[in-house]
Amino acid sequence: MAAFLPEKISILFRRSPLTGEKASRAKHPFWVMVRKEVMDHINSWRFMILLGLMLLTTIASLYTAMSSLQRAIAEDTATSFVFLKLFTATDGSLPPFITFVSLLGPLIGIALGFDAINSERSRGTLSRLLAQPIPRDYIINAKFVASLLVITFMMIILGLLMMGMGILTTGIPPTPEEFWRVFFFLLVSIVYIGVWLNLAIMFSIKFKQAATSALSGLAVWLFFSLFFTMIVNIIVESTAPSHVADINELISYQGFVQNLLRISPSQLFSEATTTLLVPTIRTLGPITLEQASFAIAGPLPLGQSLLLVWPQLTCLAAAAFIIFGISYVLFMKQEVRSRS
Amino acid sequence: MIKENIIEISGLTKQYGQLTAVDHLTLSVQRGEIFGLLGPNGAGKTTTILMLLGLSEPTAGKIKVCGIDPAFQPFLVKEKVGYLPDEVGFYENLSGLDNLLYTAALNRIEASVAEERARHLLEQVGLTSKAHDKVQTYSRGMKQRLGLADILIKEPEVIILDEPTNGIDPEGVRELLALIKELNQEKGMTVLLSSHHLYQVQQICDRVGLFVEGKLIAAGPIKELAFELFKNDPILLEVEVEPASAQLIAAIEANEHVTRVEQNRERLSIFCRQPVATEIATTIVNHGARLFHLSQHDYGLDEIYHRYFEGGM
């Protein structure tokens, strides 16, 4: 640890009068690295494939939303958020847009991060990079920032495309609130994909082989999207309180199950995004019929919806930061040897 | 002329758990010389180089490179030192020129200056015609030369080359070594190179350090090194005679300057303190044997190396 600390301090003192002029005219090395990483991503086949997949998703979910929009609107007389239905409505044959994103998001994150560090290592460029007068953490930071930028571009493109095509096909423009709701939805998606990106970067540091790293990332993804709910179900069945238990016990038990499910980032993501895109959702926890009985059915304002999902958002961001922190430490401690 | 030490290492030790990779190494390299760090694989050469660059922390000991301690100011050292790692890699999807420009940008070299330097360097290493080709089309030797251009773009004071001749064909090696020599002479650049290809390194190094199991066993110009290591029998005569009878060998051994004789069929290896080739030839002819071949061997590093391990000095 002590080895990289002085490097950081020395950056602070870098802007000496001697090097000052040179430094101001040339671009900062960190942004040079970010730019190169972004270029690498954009020029790669994998980016094209991911973009293609996402475009297909947009078209498919728009199609499924269109075919069920009429029924969805008819069912929901209380609200006027027709436009948001494009993102959540489904006719049953295909999942809606938000489910697609929660399913494919991890794939994007893993695909952009799984060979971040180990490919540099196996190409022999890592030791060459480290021999340049740049702090070591620039490498991992630049990789993360570049990938996140690419993800952001991708999500914004998708969101706008979805909105644009939605306007074209339905003829209904979004209200400002709907626009902001979609905006926050995209933001949550970016954070969510960021979690998976960091996980993939962590594996790329840990495993020397890109294939192992990709597989580990996919395994975690599959675990959370397929097996995790099954495991939670088993726990639920074995620990459920008896039917004669009183109401408070049942409620706290329900809360426990929900928190268990929330270990999975995709659960957090789906709670957050559903609340944002379906304004009529008023609570995420269990409520009794008693509590709901005098409630007036109506949508929550955006601020309240955000408040409702704030814990989910914080958790997702925290997960991303924690995983990045682990990767950072792993990377800083790693021995530099060429190609091994 | 008093030469300044550009690299000073004293009591340098690096331990990986129980294993001591570098053991109390003390060494200095003078400004403007080519110093060869020689030793078998796993002798601790790369570890030493990594510590010189501040990429690895020494367990004990002190290093000064250009007067800077790399363990505390790796940043400054990396500005002054160019390091060409073993098996250097490039971004294969970029052209050679772009790879150089990227390195230049990381060194905060202004784009126009970088472009000019890169073109000049590519010309110097003979890659001008391939400058715009992707690196994936380059041969190993070309990549190595590009690597040399890559470390020179920041105009370093010292260049450190880790196994620069590994995996290149003989002609490529010759060109690369000539290039290194040229840089050293034209720009007065200090070169530290590590290798286990002793013969190649012998051609260009001013001084060498022999490195075994983390210890420096000898350092100096190659000729002195041989003398220092083989005080008893610094000269080797290779002789081919027929018949190589026992009496003949006994007669040769009787010579006061000969320390020992090794026989391999008709070939005799005669170790001696003085150059006594003519006397040996006379002895052979006097014994009625036919002399086919007689040559005096200067100790190359190969012999030094070989004898070190054989003799278990």
Image (tube, rainbow, N blue to C red):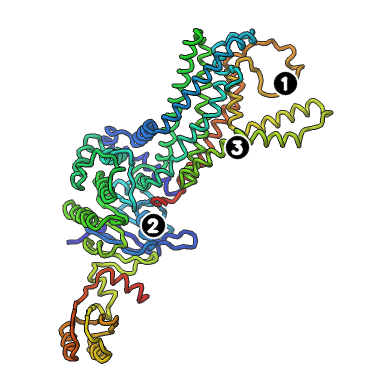
Relative to A64, residue B159 above or below? below
Label 1: chain letter: A
Amino acid carrying mark 3 in the image: Phe
Label located before the other in sequence (1 or 3): 3
Mark 1 or mark 3, whichever is nearer to me: 3
The answer for how far apart the CA atoms under marks 2 and 1 are is: 64 Å
Which residue is painted at 67% across and 31% down in the image?
A259
**Residue A135 seen:** yes
Which residue is painted at 52% across and 26% down in the image?
A189
Location of residue A21 by image quarter: top left
| Residue on which the image places disc 1 | A287
| Residue on which the image places disc 3 | A223
Q: Secondary structure at mark 3?
A: helix
The answer for how far apart the CA atoms under marks 1 and 3 are is: 30 Å
Amino acid carrying mark 1 in the image: Ile
| Residue on which the image places disc 2 | B47
Label 3: chain letter: A
Mark 3 or mark 2, whichever is nearer to me: 3
- Badge 2 and badge 1 in a common chain: no
Relative to B239, residue B101 above or below? above
Q: Are marks 1 and 3 in contact (CB under 8 Å)?
A: no
Left or right side of B183 for B162: right
Q: Secondary structure at mark 1?
A: loop
The answer for how far apart the CA atoms under marks 3 and 2 are is: 41 Å
- How many numbered circles are shown? 3
Label 2: chain letter: B
Which residue is painted at 32% across and 39% down in the image?
B106
Q: Are marks 3 and 2 in contact (CB under 8 Å)?
A: no
Amino acid carrying mark 2 in the image: Thr
Relative to A88, residue A116 above or below? below
